[in-house]
Image (cartoon, rainbow, N blue to C red):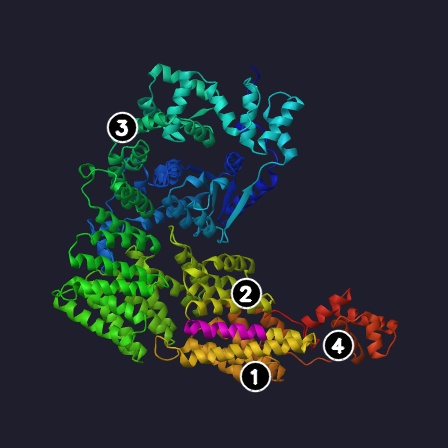
Amino acid sequence: MPAMPRLGSGIPLVARGRELRGLRAAFDAAASGRAGAVLLAGDAGVGKTRMTEEVTAFAVEQGALVLTGRCLDIGEAGLPYLPIAEALSGVRDRVRDWTALSRLFPGAGAPAGPDPGQFAAGMGMPSSGSRSEQDIGQLQLFDAVHGVLDDLARETPVVVILEDLHWADASTRSLLSFLLSRLRGQKLFILCTYRSDDLHRRHPLRPLLAELVRLPQVERIQLTPFGNADSRLFVAALAEERLSEPVLREVAGRSEGNAFFAEELLAATAEGGGGIPTTLVDVLMSRVERLSPAAQSAVRAASVGGRRVPDARLRAVSDLGDTELEEALREAVQHHVLVPGEGDVYAFRHALMRETVYGDLLPGERVRLHAAYARELSKECGTCGTAAALAHHSMESHALGPALIASVQAAEEAEGQGAPAEALEHLERALKLWEAVPAADRPEISELTLLRRASWVAGTSGDPERAIAFARSAVKAADRGEDPEHQATLRRRLAQALYVLDGREQEALENIEKAWALVADRPPSPDQAWVLAAYATILRALRRRDEAEGHARRAIEVAEAVDAGGPAAEGLITLAILAESRGLAEESRDMLVEAMRRAAAVEAITVELRARFYLAINFYEHGLLTDAIAAVDGGVDRARETGLTWSAFGLELRVVQVVMRYAAGDWDGSEAAAEPPGHRVSSTVSARLAAVGAHVAVGRGRFAEAERLVNELRSDWHRDIQIPLVAGGVGAELATWRGRPDRAVEWVRDALEWVAQAGGPTLLAAIRMSALGIAAHADLAAAATTRRDPEAAQLATVEARRLADLARDTARDGRPLTGTLGPEGRAWLARAEAELSRVGGPGDPELWRAAVDTFDYGAVYEQAVCRRRLAEALLAADRRDEAAVELRLADAVAADLGARPLREAVRKAARRGRVSLDENVETRDEVDLFTPRERSVLALVALGRTNRQVGDELFISEKTVSVHLSRIMAKLGASRRAEAVAVAYERGLLTEQSPTAG
C-alpha cells in the first residue's frame, strides 16, 4: 500500500503568507495593548484550523496564554456557551472566585430562572423565582467572562480562539458580541473561525457578523482556496514521496484549492482506491468504507453523537463489545477518520467527515442511534446541558413526548444560565411539538403558559417582532375559553408589544379597544386599570389628546380604588406628557417623578423606565442638558440593574443617552453607550443604535467606517422612521465633509421623501435635515459660480429656498411634545436661515451669530460648527478681530472633541484670513507675495488655462507667462503648476475659491 500522506500541521504552510502576516500583526498589536479581533472566514476545509494552529504556535513562542474553544454541531438550541466553557477550562483555577462562571461547567448547579413578572408590570407574565435570582443572569455571566479575560491580560498577552462559529449557539454569539464590543486597551486578541459557505440567507450568524464588522477593532480575513499553482505546491507538499504528474494534476484539479479536499483525495489515492472519486462525499465515504465492518459501525455510531463523543457514551450506544469497540476505534484513528481528544473523547478529524458519515446513515439506523443516545442522556438528568442534548436526540428519534419534556426543561435551564435566546429556541420547539404529543404525555404546563413565556423571553432579549407573534398566538389561544379579564390582559399586552414598533399604532389601537370592550362593564380590577392606562398611552401617541387624558384619569381612579400602583403610575405618565404639551413643564416633571416613585414601590419596572425616559426628554427639550443627562444615565443604570436594557424603554433610554452625550460633547461616553448589545437583538434595535452612534464617527473623521455604516443601514430604513432620519443626516454630514455636496443633497432628499411616504416628517428632524440640505446647496451654488455655470447656481438657490420654507413651515405648524419649539429646534432653524445666507454669498454674520447663540443650550459641537461659519462671514466682511475670537473658540472645542474635520476646516479658515489661533501671537498684515501680473497669471492658471491661453488673455507672450510661473512656483516652494495653485489656495493667496469640503 502506498504511504499515507502527511496530514494537518505536518506539512509546510503554503500560500498563506499574507493572511498569516495579518494575524501576526493583529496579535502584535494586542500584545502591545491594542486589543483586537479577527474573524477568519473560509469554506469548509480551506485551512482555517491550520491557521489557528500557526497562531497558537507563534503566540506561545511570544509567551502568550492561548485559550481554545470549539463549537459543537448539535442544532441551533444546543449547549449554551460550550466553546467559552472549553476555552476557560484551561484556566479553571483562575475562575473559581467568579460565581457566575460556575454555570459554564457541567455539574455546576445552575441558578433558578428569572422572574419576569416582577420586572415588567403591565407587560410581563407571572413566573416563579425570587428577585435576587434575576441579578444572576446573562449580563452577570458576560461581565464575569470579560473580567476573567481582562485579569489574565494584565499579566500576559491572551489569545482566545473560538473555532467553528457557524455552529455557535445564540448565547455564545451574544457573549462574543459583548466581548468584541468591549475590546479597548487590553492585551487580548480574539480569533474566531467560521464556514462562510455554511451561512445561508437565514443563518443566525449572519446578523451578528454584520454587527461585528462595524466595530473598528474587528477585522475580517477571508481565507480563499488556493490558485492552480498553489494547489500543486500544496499537494506536492502533502506527499511523503514525489508524486507522478498525472496524480499531482488530478488531485490538485479535483481539490479546487481546498486543502482538506486535497488531503482526502490524496489519502484515497494512497490507500489504493480504484481511482479518484468525483465528489468529496465519495472520497470521504471511500475512506470509511475501507475500514472493517466493526470500525465502520463505531464511526457511524459516533457520527450521531456529534463532532466529539465521550468514550463512555459511545460504548453505551454501540452494538460492539468493549474489546471489539477498542479495536474498531484504533483502526479509525489509524486511518485518520477519528482522532483521540482530551478527556476520553473521540473526535472526527474534520467536521465534513462526520457530516458525510451521518448523512449516509439509513433512516432507521439514524433513528435507532439517536434513541440510544437519548436513553443514555436520560440517565444523566440534572447535569448541566443534558436537557438540551436530550431534547435534540429525542426529537431526531421521533420520541416526541420526551422531546417536549426535555425542551421545556432545557428552556428553564437556559433561562437559569442567563441565555434567553436559547430559552426561546427550546420554547419554540416545545410549542411545535405540543399538538403532536398526547395530553397524558405532556409536562405539567399549559400551551398558553408556553406562549406567554416565549413572548416574554423574546421581548426581554430584544426581539419585539417575535414577541408580537407569540402574543398574537396567546390571544388566539385565550379566546378559546379563558375568562374575559384574562383575554383582556393578553390583548392589552399584544397592543403594547405592537405599540413598540413604528407603523403598528393602528393595530395596537384596535387590540386595546377590544381589550377594553372585554372589561368595560366589569367591576373595577387591576386588569381593567392596566387596559385603561395602555389605552391612554396609545391614544396620546395618535394625538387624540382629550381622549387620552380622559382614559388616563380613569385609569388612575380605578387603580387607586383597587390599590394597583403600576397602572396608576402609567396613567400619571400620560397626564404628565399632556401637561408638558400645554406648556406646564415643571408640573409635568413633578408628575413624572411621582410616577417613578409609585412604579418603583410596586416594582413595575417597565413603567418606571417609561417615566425616567420622559423625564429626561422633558429636561432635554427645555435646554436643561445637564439635568437631562443625569436623568437618562439613571434610567440606563436602572434598566441594566433589572435586566431590561433592551426592553422597549430600556432601548429608548439608551438611544437618547447616545444623542445627549454627543450633544454635550462627551463623545467617548456617546460611543460607549452606542456599543452593540451584549446579546442578539432584532435588526430594528441594532439599526437604531448604530444610526445614532454614527455621528461620532463622522465628527472624528472616521469617514470609511461611517460610510460603510450608513450604506449598510440603508436596508433598514423601513424598520423605523427614526432610522432614515438619523442615517440620512449622518450621510449628508459625511458627504459635506468629504466635499461631495451633491451626495449630501441626495441623502437629504431620499430621507425626507422616505419619511413623507411613511406619513410625514418628524418635527425636529425635518428642520435639521433641511438645514443640512441648505448647506449642501450653498456649496453647490458656490462651486457653480466658480466654474461660471449660472444655471446650476440658480437651481441650487431654488432648492435651498424650498428647504428653508420646509424648515419654517415645520417650525410653525408642527406639534412638539413640549407644545412649543424647544431650544434644539430653534437652534437648527437659526442655522437653516444662516446657511441660506451662504447661497450666492459669503454668509450673513448676524444670522450666523444668531445660530451660535441658539446652540448655547449645551450643544458644543454644533455651536463650534456655526462659529466656524460665523468666522468666515466675518472675514468676508473684513472683521478679522471678531473672526479670530470665533475661530479660536471653535478650534478649542474641535481639539477637545477630537473633531478632526472641523479642526482642519477652522485652521484652513485661519490661514486664509491670516489669523493666529494662538491669541498671544499677533498676526501682522503682510505685503502681497505676488506682483499684480503674477497674481493675474496664477488666477488664470487656477481656472485651468494653458500658458498660451493665459498669454492671449493678458496680451503677453507664452514665454513671459512661463517666466511668471517660474517665479510664482519659486515663491511658493512648488515644483509644478498644479502644486502652486493648491498651495496658493491653502495659504489663502487666491481669493476666488474652487469647490471645497465643508
Disc with the residue nearer the chain's start (4 vs 3): 3
Q: Where is residue 784, by image quadrant?
A: bottom right
Query: Which residue is nearer to you in this view: 635 or 561?
Result: 561
**What residue range appears in magenta?**
760-777
User: Residue 504 appears at what percent x and percent y?
Assistant: 34, 63
Q: With respect to residue 117, does 657 lie above or below? A: below
Question: At numbered mark 1, what does the secondary structure look like: helix, strand or loop?
Answer: loop
Amino acid at pointer 2: Leu
User: Which residue was labeled with disc 3?
Assistant: 375
**Quarter that holds the C terminus:** bottom right
Q: With respect to residue 363, does 946 lie above or below? A: below
Category of crowding for the residue at label 3, using alpha-carbon neighbours closer than 10 angstroms: few (below 14), some (14–19), many (at least 20)? some
Amino acid at pointer 1: Asp
User: Which residue was labeled with disc 4?
Assistant: 929
Residue contact between numbered discs 4 and 3, judged by CB atoms under 8 Å: no
Marks 2, 3: nearer the viewer = 3
State the separation of the CA atoms marked 4 and 1.
30 Å
State the separation of the CA atoms marked 2 and 1.
25 Å
Disc with the residue nearer the chain's start (2 vs 1): 2
Residue contact between numbered discs 4 and 2, judged by CB atoms under 8 Å: no
Category of crowding for the residue at label 1, using alpha-carbon neighbours closer than 10 angstroms: few (below 14), some (14–19), many (at least 20)? many
Marks 1, 3: nearer the viewer = 3
User: Which residue was labeled with disc 2?
Assistant: 734
Question: At numbered mark 2, what does the secondary structure look like: helix, strand or loop?
Answer: helix
Give the side of residue 914 with respect to residue 807, left or right: right
**Magenta run includes residue 776:** yes
State the separation of the CA atoms marked 4 and 3.
93 Å
